[in-house]
Image (tube, grey):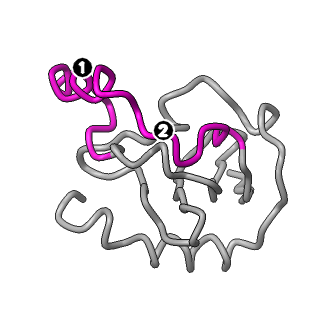
Amino acid sequence: MTAIFLKTATGTGTVGEKPSWVERFCSRLFSFLHSNPSYDKLHLVAVWYIEFIDGEPWREVGFDLAGKPVVSGPDAINYGFWLDTNMTLDDFSGESIPKEEFESVWLLSKELRKGKA
């Protein structure tokens, strides 16, 4: 089992752009179909920290522009944004980070998963 840790801006092209009222309404209406019901702040993510196991996304933490964690998964109710794709490590660009750095941000984001794991 090979673990790789990456810091990336992949998938953050619309940072701060709030979903339209129609998107928000439909999202709430069909929330029972979502694999990430608590990821309503996804539009705020500017940077991702992602752990890959054997090339597959395993854990993730998304940070806003101020460096505050806004999404984190997986947990008991959120599958995870990148975990819910068929993307692999080869589909990402970014900088490799040490395991210790990822683990520290994972702990920092614990409150987002509190009561959900």
Which SS class for mark 1? helix
Instruction: Work out whether residue 102 or residue 43 is closer to the camera in this orientation and state it.
Output: 43
The answer to which quarter of the image holds residue 57 is top right
Say which mark, if any, is on residue 81. 2
The answer to which quarter of the image holds residue 80 is top left
Residue under the image location 60 percent in, 64 percent down: 65
- The relative height of residue 105 versus residue 56 in the rendered view (above or below) is below
Is 62 situated left or right of 99 in this image?
left
Residue 18 lies within the magenta run: yes
- The relative height of residue 77 versus residue 62 in the rendered view (above or below) is above
Residue 33: x, y in percent? 23, 21
Say which mark, if any, is on residue 106. none
Crowding at dot 1, Cα within 10 Å, few <14 / some 14-19 / many 20+, comes out as few
Residue 10: x, y in percent? 71, 41
Crowding at dot 2, Cα within 10 Å, few <14 / some 14-19 / many 20+, comes out as many
- The relative height of residue 46 versus residue 17 in the rendered view (above or below) is below
- The relative height of residue 70 versus residue 101 in the rendered view (above or below) is above
The answer to which quarter of the image holds residue 109 is bottom left
Is 33 situated left or right of 70 in this image?
left
Residue under the image location 78 percent in, 31 percent down: 91
Instruction: Work out whether residue 31 or residue 80 is closer to the camera in this orientation and state it.
Output: 31
Residue under the image location 37 percent in, 28 percent down: 20
Q: Quadrant of the C terminus?
A: bottom left
Which SS class for mark 2? loop
Residue under the image location 32 percent in, 43 percent down: 78
Magenta segment:
10-38
Residue kind at label 2, given as amino acid type: Phe
Is 27 situated left or right of 86 in this image?
left
Q: Give the labeled residue for mark 1.
A: 26
Residue 72: x, y in percent? 43, 57
Q: Distance between the residues labelled 2 and 1?
A: 18 Å
